[in-house]
Image: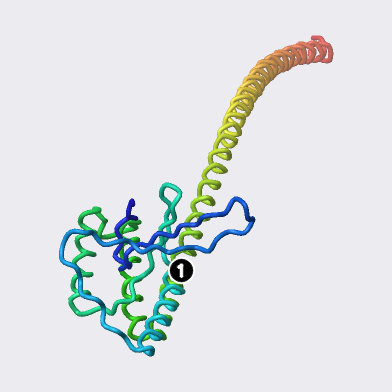
Amino acid sequence: MIPPAESLLKYDNPVLVSKKTDRKSPKARPLKVLPQQPPLSGPVPPPPKPRSPAADANRQQTEEILNSLLPPREWAEEGQLWVQQVSSTPCTRTDVVQLQGQLDGLLQQRQARETGICPVRRELYSQCFDELIRQVTINCAERGMLLLRVRNEIRMTVAAYQTLYESSMAFGVRKALQAEQGKADMETRISDLEMEKQDLERQVNEQKAKCEAVEKREMERRQTEERKHSEEIQFLKRTNQQLKAQLEGTIAPKK
């Protein structure tokens, strides 16, 4: 038999559940539970003391409550089904101290992180809490059921936080992809705008050159017109003086 992984939750000895079917009859035979046989070597334990029917009823009721709160674990090996139920043996102060030592030892052995998110630490503390529920349930079933509600609420809260974390991670990745896509589009737009800016600057330079050429041409034309105008004025002044001199010479009396 291959035993399951070590757990802080205390279990009874595993029992073998064998299921055999009759080939001639379609109906299956009932399950047979075979307890694990003790080794032949060593002293033979004394027979158990007879218990009262009330004690047996209380023990059976406690086992039923424990099985409903902490279901037994099962595993298959070579076509055989093994079942291991939670122990219904009451605990002592020594058991609690031993549980604390086992918890500390497993935390160091499995190298659980002391801070932050650590699945190993969470698993070990969950097993320890289940063991505390088992110990409390044996003494007071109502208190154990209340602790079970607390455990389930903690698990629901952790699951909600995990779902929220996963959704936030997906949202962050989606936003990052959108940002990357928007970044590429923005870079393309920036490149287009820079090219448009260069084209506009080229057009502005061409228009400035045209404007300077027009101003220069108009200034030269204005200077030419002013020079012509001044020459024409000078010519008219000389002509006027000559005509005035001729007129004065004509009007003046002859001696």
Compared with residue 121, is residue 250 higher up or lower down, i.e. above or below?
above
Q: Amino acid at mark 1?
A: Thr
Residue sticking out furthest to the left: 43
- Toward which corner of the image does residue 140 lie, by quadrant? bottom left
Residue 196: % across, % down: 63, 28
Question: Which residue lies at the image location 33% right of the left edge and 72% below the top edge?
Answer: 87
Q: How is the image coloured?
A: rainbow
Mark 1 — residue? Answer: 157
Where does the C terminus fall, quadrant-wise? Answer: top right
Given residues 163 and 244, the one toward you in this image is 163
Residue 52: % across, % down: 34, 89
Compared with residue 141, is residue 211 higher up or lower down, i.e. above or below?
above
Residues packed near mark 1 inside 10 Å, few (<14), some (14 to 19) or many (20 plus): few
- Toward which corner of the image does residue 254 lie, by quadrant? top right
Given residues 138 and 99, the one toward you in this image is 138
Given residues 179 and 7, the one toward you in this image is 7
Secondary structure at numbered mark 1: helix
Residue 99: % across, % down: 23, 69
Residue sticking out furthest to the front: 24
Compared with residue 200, is residue 19 higher up or lower down, i.e. above or below?
below
- Toward which corner of the image does residue 221 lie, by quadrant? top right
Residue 219: % across, % down: 65, 20
The answer to whether residue 35 is left or right of residue 21 is left
